[in-house]
Image (cartoon, coloured by chain):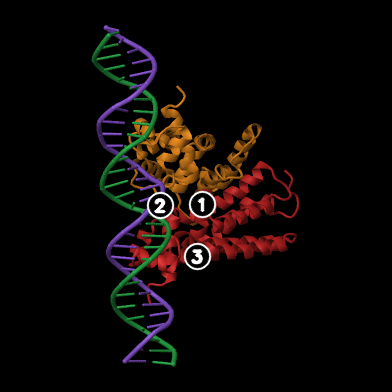
Chain colours: A red, B orange, C purple, D green
Amino acid sequence: MSTSAEDLRAIALAEFATAGYAATSLHRIADLAGLSKSSVLYHYASKETLLEATVAPAIHRMEEILGALEASALTPAGRAAFLSEFVDFILQYRREVNMFINQGQSLVDVPVIDEANAIVHRLADFFAANTASIEEKMRFGIALGGAAYMLCSPESMAFDADQVDEARAALLKILTELLAPVTAPVAIGE
Amino acid sequence: MSTSAEDLRAIALAEFATAGYAATSLHRIADLAGLSKSSVLYHYASKETLLEATVAPAIHRMEEILGALEASALTPAGRAAFLSEFVDFILQYRREVNMFINQGQSLVDVPVIDEANAIVHRLADFFAANTASIEEKMRFGIALGGAAYMLCSPESMAFDADQVDEARAALLKILTELLAPVTAPVAIGE
DNA sequence: ACGATAACTGACCGATCGGTCAGCGGCTGT
DNA sequence: ACAGCCGCTGACCGATCGGTCAGTTATCGT
């Protein structure tokens, strides 16, 4: 009852995000789950399959959010809604987001990771659609990479439960501030 | 003459930063250098020694900058000078910084990486000395992690030579903006 | 009572890992 | 001419990697 595929997924996610995909062995995942390596490979055909199962939910959710953004791109309200949803997304899938950002480059040719990289690229394209000055590219990159780093950095990893709302508000404020020149419906030129 | 220890250091740095330390084999470094694995281990006693040589210059430079910051902490000019030096540091040692940020957690118990982590911690402590609200912690983390991600992200990796000044100016502006509530000599409370 | 299926395991496989070692050719000082 | 060092190499080592497979146990439908 206890040791299920879902448990393995959660354990693998934590290990992949903190130690890295390449540095995490199936043996270690099995140990943490109290199983043998063979049992891990019974639930997931391969290490790569386990990785896919680990990150798939976050990818699908991000696709939803990105689709909504692209659909309502013209309205300022749509962009504001995106930022709010995006912050919730980062908070909910913090470990997955951290994996994409930190290991996305090294895990290319893994199909599901390529998919995640493509989404990041779509998001970047959206924000760089009208103008692509270096500063605005950099604002976007700092917002994305910075948020990902923050939420998985060892010191900031542990939020008290009563601080999560404050963290959410602070993150939303900072990201809005960072992306203001880009998300502003008018007066983009500097 | 051509294949020297310094060449190996540069090759290893590029590979460690993009593919990750654990995922980079000595064999691959040797191949890229046109040498055998044994030759790599002739120049560097072990893979870990190579890692240390790879990141040591960046660590020493960061210690200098951090020391100067702590010495001149009281003066607004000192803090402004730090930000400028810090931006130059990030631009010059972009790959090393990216390694610290992305792989610092997974490479603990490697002494030289622990040293780097300690420096990041010292830096964080400095900015969190007077006040440690979640928002300000988050501003610091986003500035640091975001800058590191930006400068090694695949799309932004290639700056045109004539754009590097613009990139520097943009980075300095954004970081100043991000850390403004913290670096402001007065009126820190919110 | 009995087959089917699910969950799991240890033994084993080839490949690759970091690292050791004896020895190679070439250059230099004497 | 010869000793010594430097850069380098292939062969080899034990450990670990991801993955396969035959087999065990337990639960469930009939």
Instruction: Tell me the subunit letter for badge 2.
Output: A
Q: Quadrant of residue A34?
A: bottom left
**Above or below for B1 versus A152:** above
Residue at x 54% of width, y 66% of height:
A57
**Above or below for A17 versus B127:** below
Task: Please provide percent x and percent y for residue C3.
Answer: 39, 84
Task: Please provide percent x and percent y for residue D15.
Answer: 29, 50
User: In terms of sequence position, does the residue under pointer 2 or pointer 3 come before the other?
Assistant: 2
Report, in whole angstroms, how far the alpha carbon at label 2 lies from the one at label 3: 18 Å
Q: Is residue B107 left or right of residue A134?
A: left
Instruction: Tell me the subunit letter for badge 3.
Output: A
Task: Please provide percent x and percent y for residue B180.
Answer: 56, 45
**Label number found at residue A23:** 2
Q: Amino acid at mark 3?
A: Ala
Residue at x 46% of width, y 51% of height:
B131
Instruction: Specify whether disc 1 shares its chain with disc 2.
Output: yes
Q: Amino acid at mark 2?
A: Ala
Task: Please provide percent x and percent y for residue B110.
Answer: 34, 44
Q: Residues within 10 Å of mark 2 (few under 14, many from 20)?
A: some
Check contact, mark 1 vs mark 2: CB within 8 A. no
Picture quarter with the N terminus of chain A: bottom left
* Residue placed under numbered mark 1 in the picture: A107
